Amino acid sequence: MKHLSTAILFAIASISLSVHGAEPNWSKFQANFYFSCPFEASCVEAYSNLMSSPEIADKKFEAALYSMAHNGMDEATHVMRFYFKDAAEYMKAGQTFSASPAMAEFLAFGREAGNKPQYQTLTTHTIAEGDPRGTKAALRWSINVSDPATFVPAWTKMAAELAEKPWGGKAYGLQTYYLGSLGTVTHEVWVGFDSPVEALTFLDEFPKTAEWQSYTLDVADAVSIVRSYMELTAISLNED
């Protein structure tokens, strides 16, 4: 947990809680910290204790802890994501976490529990549609885009069409990697759902569609999938 915690101390920023409106208040930056946790229930409890401590809770960070499923050879089991509206918010949180007794306890727990940091990334929402607030599952594809001019419009068209299907996701998006790409990964595609059952239905249905068939022909030489996985929400805080 040492490297993971150091990154948190100097990278997380405070997110202000806003009243839920008709549209989500999308973040500009997302800091993502992937780690392996051998005892999931204990990790969820430790994260909850950290984020509910007075010196952190009153800052109202927009943050979430997710478990990862069906992620192949990737050894990460969980990811902590922190959402920042701008660069100024990104810079603020180091002071909060560096002075936090709860952070010291969180680090001690990680050392004792055998948690291991895996990797960190910084992404931005290039495209974000729908309303992901309250979703409990997401499908994510880490991709390598070699021809953005071909891929982006083709994917945007296909994603919007699939969103209209009765089994379509509640929200979807395209994230671009600023820092920490995983080898050949340049972007991350995601689709959010209210439950894992809905996510599995989507997986079963979308390859059958004419929209998907057309898309695959359009982008045959423009993009390739590096990995895919399901993400399940363990704790979500201050969604706006």
Image: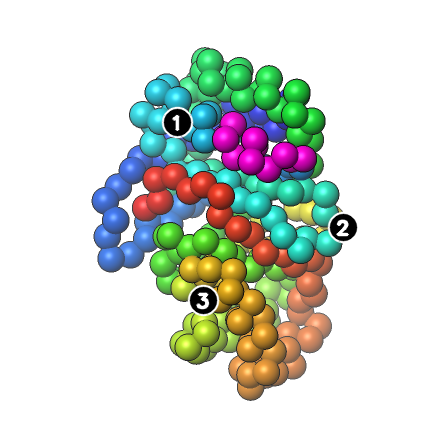
Residues 200 and 75: in front is 200
Residue 124 on image: x %, y %: 49, 48
Name the residue tied to disc 3.
169
Dot 2 or dot 1: first in sequence order is 1
Question: Crowdedness of circle 1 by 10 Å Cα count: few (<14), some, many (20+)?
Answer: some
- How far is the residue under mark 3 from the one under mark 1? 30 Å
Kind of residue indicated by mark 3: Gly
Residues 72 and 29: in front is 72
Looking at the rendering, the stretch of residues picked out in magenta corresponds to 37-47
Residue 5 placement: quadrant: top right
Whether residues under marks 3 and 1 lie with C-beta atoms below 8 angstroms apart, the answer is no
Name the residue tied to disc 2.
73
For numbered disc 2, what is the local secondary structure? loop
Whether residue 211 is visible, yes or no, is: yes
Residue shown at 35% from the left, 27% from the top: 57
Indicate yes or no whether the magenta region holds residue 70: no
192 vs 108, left or right, is: left
Residue 213 on image: x %, y %: 61, 83
Dot 3 or dot 1: first in sequence order is 1
Indicate yes or no whether the magenta region holds residue 41: yes
Residues 91 and 55: in front is 55
Q: Classify 185 as above or below 15.
A: below
For numbered disc 3, what is the local secondary structure? loop
Name the residue tied to disc 1.
52
Question: Crowdedness of circle 3 by 10 Å Cα count: few (<14), some, many (20+)?
Answer: many
Residue shown at 53% from the left, 44% from the top: 66
Kind of residue indicated by mark 2: Met
Residue 220 placement: quadrant: bottom right
